Structures are given as structure tokens and as C-alpha cells.
Amino acid sequence: MYTNLSEIQQQNYYNLCGETYQRSEMKGRFSTSKPYNNELYKFSPWGFEYIFDKENGYLLCELSHKIADKRMYGWDQNGEELPKEIVSKYFKSNKVA
């Protein structure tokens, strides 16, 4: 069992949503005005959802926007990308970036 995101997972989280991971939460959903940590993005916010699977140590994230396909990502504790088949099981959509 894992109790927290690894440093590389925290960096991947930040790179996707532009916000620092709050260590107390294992899952959440919010709007971000900085998708892909893009400070220059000035359009409508993106939805960001994340899940930390404590049993496997996986970080799973989804970026969504009303005019774009959902984009899902996942990493293990070493920062290795998870296979599409694993990531798609955690979210309703089946489109993995």
C-alpha cells in the first residue's frame, strides 16, 4: 500500500493542471485555467480530475473541455506511463492521450 504520490508523480500532476498537489487528498475534481501548466492559456477553463490508487501506487488524471476530447494519463510510482487499458478503467471515457 502506498500513502502518497512520488515526487515524479507530483511533478506530472503539476505539469497537467498547473497546481501543486495537496497531499491530503487522494482524489478530486476542479477547473484549471492552466491546462498543461500553460500560463499563457487565456480561454475557458478545463476540467481536471485525479485519482490516487493507494493499493497500486498509481496516479490517474483526466483533462476535459467542452470542445475537446477528454485526455487521460496515468503513472506508476516511478513515473512510468501506465498502459491505456489500465488508465481507461478509472474513468468513464475510453480515450487515452
Image (spheres, rainbow, N blue to C red):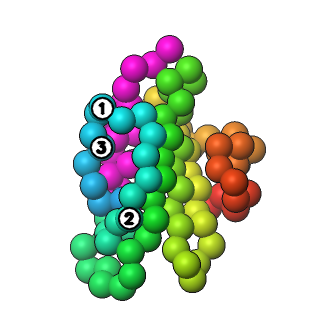
The residue depicted at 43 percent of the width and 46 percent of the height is 28
Q: Position of residue 40 (x, y in %)?
A: 26, 80
Q: CA distance from mark 2 to mark 3?
A: 14 Å
The residue depicted at 27 percent of the width and 40 percent of the height is 22
User: Visible in this render: residue 74?
Assistant: yes
The residue depicted at 45 percent of the width and 59 percent of the height is 48
Look at the numbered disc 2 and give the secondary structure of its residue.
strand
Hey, what amino acid is under mark 1? Ser
Q: Is residue 10 magenta?
A: yes
Which residues are drawn in magenta?
Answer: 1-16
Q: Taking 88 as reference, is 47 above or below it?
A: below
Q: Is residue 92 magenta?
A: no
Residue at the disc numbered 3: 21
The residue depicted at 25 percent of the width and 73 percent of the height is 39
Residue at the disc numbered 2: 31
Q: CA distance from mark 1 to mark 3?
A: 9 Å
Look at the numbered disc 1 and give the secondary structure of its residue.
loop
Q: Position of residue 18 (x, y in %)?
A: 30, 60
Residue at the disc numbered 1: 24
